């Protein structure tokens, strides 16, 4: 088979040719005398040569087109050198969140059936101890110090011995990346992202910023860095722990923005909420910021409004909506959101996440946990949507939408719908589409309540209660048997809030709206469990178990 590469790398090659000395990755490394992070820079020419070296070494070791390669490397220049090196020879990186739990991660990685493994020292130790999970691995490269035989990324050097052999662009439908979902709202699945999927994401990111050159971007999500480098950005990586993004020091974020005059920021709500509090507390301004893109979980409208107050007037704040299988699905800018749309969310209309992204199509299908392998199966259930506005499950299709799971074997049957040559992805999200074509998100399908009075949807209800003074956030859970579940609202208080006063406000708010009247109990929780990847998605399943114990009942 011919050697292939990801055609989107032609963009990267053009940038290297035009601006070889431009900083590509600016990464935290050590500390200054003032106690702030120190930074090093890797130029585009250096990243190109380093990734060429990685590609050359892998080809020599027999790793090439279609070879699945586990990558367990912390965010930094090494990660991008490895990923770009693999993309240059058509190998398929396998990426996963180690924070999902050791044995869940091992089970997922065993299913990947990889032949190559690139990982930090701790990851390589894991591979050796649990060697039965990695039986097909024949090439292992350590990033960092190695205590066993085998090459290290450092031993490979950063300069190739010769030019890479002639290659051709891979077909758009060929796998480029295998990415695991976190499993925070369902079983973890291996998503096949093709060469065409990732290329479409680049076009969508470029279109979302109105084709304005990114200049300098602050990155807290690795996938954003992959795309930003192909648009010529200087990517700044502040110090953070991937499994504890919410613990990122906002002072370090401010320092990076000021030091490198960051224009664009990619961050989850877990980073933005503490950052906003820091800016308010210190009065620091960030005059260089022109746009902020957030994703991973819904951004509280109070955070978006707060950012508008502290950022330059011309800055744009985008709330993104997507999934591992479809990134992005939709975006909305703060000026559109902070009006009637927020007010409508606060009276039970669901959170507006914006219109579908470039070339993405969205539809609503009836709520069911049954497989719907063909669109005729959907048509056979016409009229079954539940709730006001015809709330149902959101399905999407488009060039950036994955059409296939690698694992588990049953995932395609339950997660995809075929309509001729089009494959629709079942998001598992409940929503409705308004007259302007915008998606109104109401909650996860797996977290819906089935009460004696009918279904209830988490986010739709929670948005009504989140307006009460003293409430940090709420989570609706069901206690009891499905079909007779008791709706319970778990409440996380703001610091210093009076619990009795807040509870009175919640009860009064409940009685104002039909969508909230069924809520039977209010329980106060010290701190909600959240997902690993973004530290923002609420673990309602765990809260349901907690609530049942508090009430002396069993969770459904």
Image: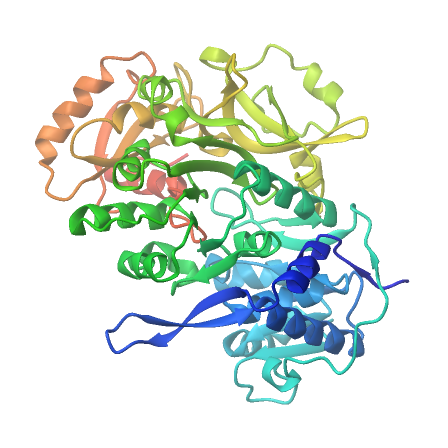
| 134 to 261, vertically: above or below | below
**Residue at 44% in and 62% down:** 237
Residue 232 placed where, x, y %? 58, 55
| 276 to 434, vertically: above or below | below
| 52 to 477, vertically: above or below | below
Q: Quadrant of residue 200?
A: top right
In this rendering, position of residue 552 left or right of residue 554:
left
Residue 339 placed where, x, y %? 34, 20
**Residue at 55% in and 33% down:** 428
Name the quarter where the C terminus is drawn.
top left
Q: Quadrant of residue 158?
A: bottom right
Residue 153 placed where, x, y %? 61, 80
The answer, for residue 277, to whether it is visible in the render is: yes
Q: Please name whichever residue, 331 or 412, is drawn nearer the observer in this view of the structure.
A: 331
**Residue at 39% in and 61% down:** 260
In the displayed image of the protein, which residue is found farthest to the right?
Answer: 1
- The tally of labels here is 0
Q: Quadrant of residue 525?
A: top left
Q: How is the image coloured?
A: rainbow
Name the quarter where the N terminus is drawn.
bottom right
């Amino acid at each position: 088979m011919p050697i292939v590469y990801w055609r989107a790398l032609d963009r990267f090659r053009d940038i290297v040719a035009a601006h070889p000395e431009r900083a590509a990755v600016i990464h935290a490394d050590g500390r200054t005398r003032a106690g702030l992070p120190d930074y090093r820079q890797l130029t585009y020419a250096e990243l190109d040569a380093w990734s060429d070296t990685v590609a050359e070494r892998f080809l020599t070791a027999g790793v090439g087109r279609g070879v699945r390669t586990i990558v367990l490397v912390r965010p930094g220049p090494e990660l991008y050198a490895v990923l770009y090196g693999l993309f240059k020879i058509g190998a398929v990186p396998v990426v996963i969140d180690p924070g999902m739990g050791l044995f869940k991660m091992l089970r997922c990685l065993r299913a990947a059936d990889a032949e190559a493994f690139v990982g930090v020292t701790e990851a390589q130790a894991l591979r050796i101890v649990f060697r039965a999970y990695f039986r097909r691995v024949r090439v292992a490269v350590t990033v960092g110090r190695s205590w066993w035989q085998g090459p290290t990324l450092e031993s490979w050097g950063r300069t190739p011995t010769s030019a890479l052999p002639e290659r051709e662009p891979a077909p758009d439908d060929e796998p480029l990346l295998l990415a695991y979902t976190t499993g925070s709202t369902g079983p973890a699945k291996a998503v096949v992202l093709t060469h065409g999927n990732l290329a479409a994401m680049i076009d969508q990111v470029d279109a979302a910023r109105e084709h304005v050159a990114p200049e300098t971007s602050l990155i807290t999500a690795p996938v954003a860095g992959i795309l930003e480098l192909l648009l010529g950005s200087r990517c700044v990586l502040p110090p953070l722990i991937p499994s504890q993004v919410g613990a990122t020091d906002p002072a370090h974020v401010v320092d990076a923005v000021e030091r490198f005059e960051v224009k664009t920021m990619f961050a989850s709500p877990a980073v933005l909420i503490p950052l906003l509090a820091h800016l308010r507390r210190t009065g620091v301004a960030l005059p260089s910021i022109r746009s902020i893109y957030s994703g991973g979980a819904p951004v509280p409208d109070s955070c978006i409004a707060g950012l508008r107050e502290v950022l330059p007037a011309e800055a744009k704040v985008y709330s993104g909506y997507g999934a591992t299988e479809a990134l992005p699905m939709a975006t909305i800018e703060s000026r559109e959101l902070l009006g009637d749309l927020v007010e409508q969310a606060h009276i039970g209309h669901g959170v507006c996440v914006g219109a579908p992204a470039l070339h993405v199509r969205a539809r609503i299908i009836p709520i069911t946990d049954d497989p719907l392998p063909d669109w005729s199966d959907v048509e056979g259930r016409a009229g079954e949507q539940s709730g006001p506005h015809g709330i149902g499950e959101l399905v999407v299709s488009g060039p950036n939408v994955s059409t296939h799971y690698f694992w588990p074997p049953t995932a395609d049957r339950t997660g995809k719908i075929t309509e001729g040559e089009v494959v629709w992805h079942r998001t598992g999200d409940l929503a409705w589409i308004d007259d302007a074509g915008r998606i109104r998100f109401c909650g996860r399908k797996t977290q819906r309540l089935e009460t004696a009075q009918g279904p209830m949807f988490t986010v739709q209800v929670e948005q009504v209660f989140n307006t009460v003074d003293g409430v940090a956030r709420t989570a609706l859970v069901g206690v009891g048997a499905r079909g007779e579940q008791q709706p319970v609202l778990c409440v996380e208080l703001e610091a210093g809030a009076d619990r009795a006063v807040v509870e009175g406000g919640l009860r009064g708010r409940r009685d104002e709206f039909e969508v909230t009247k069924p809520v039977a109990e209010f329980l106060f929780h010290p701190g909600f469990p959240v997902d690993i990847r973004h530290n923002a998605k609420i673990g309602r399943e765990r809260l349901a178990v907690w609530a049942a114990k508090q009430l002396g009942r069993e969770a459904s």
